[in-house]
Image (cartoon, rainbow, N blue to C red):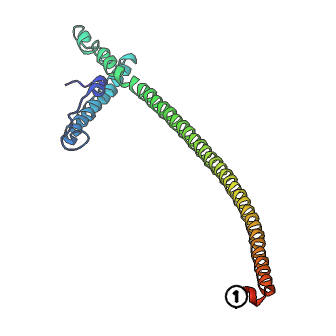
Amino acid sequence: MALTPDDVVTKQFQHVRFKDGFDPDEVDDFLDEIVIEWRKALEENVELKAKLAAYESGEAPAAAPAAEAPVAEVPAPAPAAAVETPAEPTPTVSATATAGIIELAQRLHDEHVAEGEAKRNQLIADAENEVNRIRSEAEAKQREEAARLERERNTLEARITELRNFERDYRSQLRGYIEGQLRELDEKSASTDSTPVSAIGL
């Protein structure tokens, strides 16, 4: 078969089951066909270019029959044009395609790098915000706890003062009560000592 660049571009390989990729034998066979056809095209190209150069330089045999000229010489440029047309643009198309692929790969690389840097910056910013939030919450809790402890300390101090005052008042009242009881006992004892024995009934 006559192999064209379009055949190379549109060639579809069968997928192999149970593993990724294409059938290696099928790919090798197709590449062998490409090599054979390309070598033929290169040889025909060289041969036709040599014939064309000989024809243009006037080295063609003059005794050749007139009827054979259109058959032998005229069709030669047509195959040359047909062979040279896919052979010569191929490097240009290949180079353009390669340059496009490289440009696309570079653009994708730059996009991935920019995306990675943006993601890194976002993660750093989120981490800093989280640290600031945790620090603010800790400081707020610390202030709240300090205020609560201060309120409890004031309450306890007030309670201690109240208990001390109560103790002082209680001691004072108790002392007064005991002293009053002692005075009453003294008074009763004194009155008993001053009463005559006859008054008691002895």
In the rendered image, which quarter contains the C terminus? bottom right
Q: Is residue 157 left or right of residue 40?
A: right
* Residue 119 figure quarter: top right
Residue 77, x across and y down, in percent: 32, 15
Residue 88 place in picture, x, y as percent = 39, 24
Say which of 196 and 48 sits in front: 196
Place of residue 93 in the rendered image (x, y in percent of width and height, measured from the top left): 41, 25
Which residue is located at x 38 percent, y 26 percent? 90
Q: Residue at x 32, y 19 (%)?
A: 80
Residue 67 in view in this figure: yes
Q: Which residue is mark 1?
A: 201
User: Which secondary structure, mark 1?
Assistant: loop
Q: Is residue 36 above or below residue 85?
A: below
Q: From the viewer's perspective, is residue 11 above or below residue 153?
A: above
The reply, left or right, for residue 103 in relation to residue 135 is: left
Answer with left or right where residue 148 lies relative to residue 43. Answer: right
Q: Could you tell me how many numbered marks the image carries?
A: 1
Outermost residue, top direction? 67
In the image, 75 versus 93, the foreground residue is 93
List x then y, in percent, for residue 134.
61, 48
Residue 167: which quarter of the image? bottom right
Relative height, residue 149 to residue 92 (above, below)? below
Indicate whether 96 appears above or below 72: below
Q: Amino acid at mark 1?
A: Gly
Relative side of 154 to 111, left or right: right
| Front residue of 57 and 125 | 125
Q: Quadrant of the N terminus?
A: top left
Instruction: Kindly indicate the quadrant of the structure image that contains residue 113.
Output: top right
Residue beneath the point at 31% across and 21% down: 83
The answer, for residue 88, to whether it is visible in the render is no
Q: Residue at x 19, y 44 (%)?
A: 18
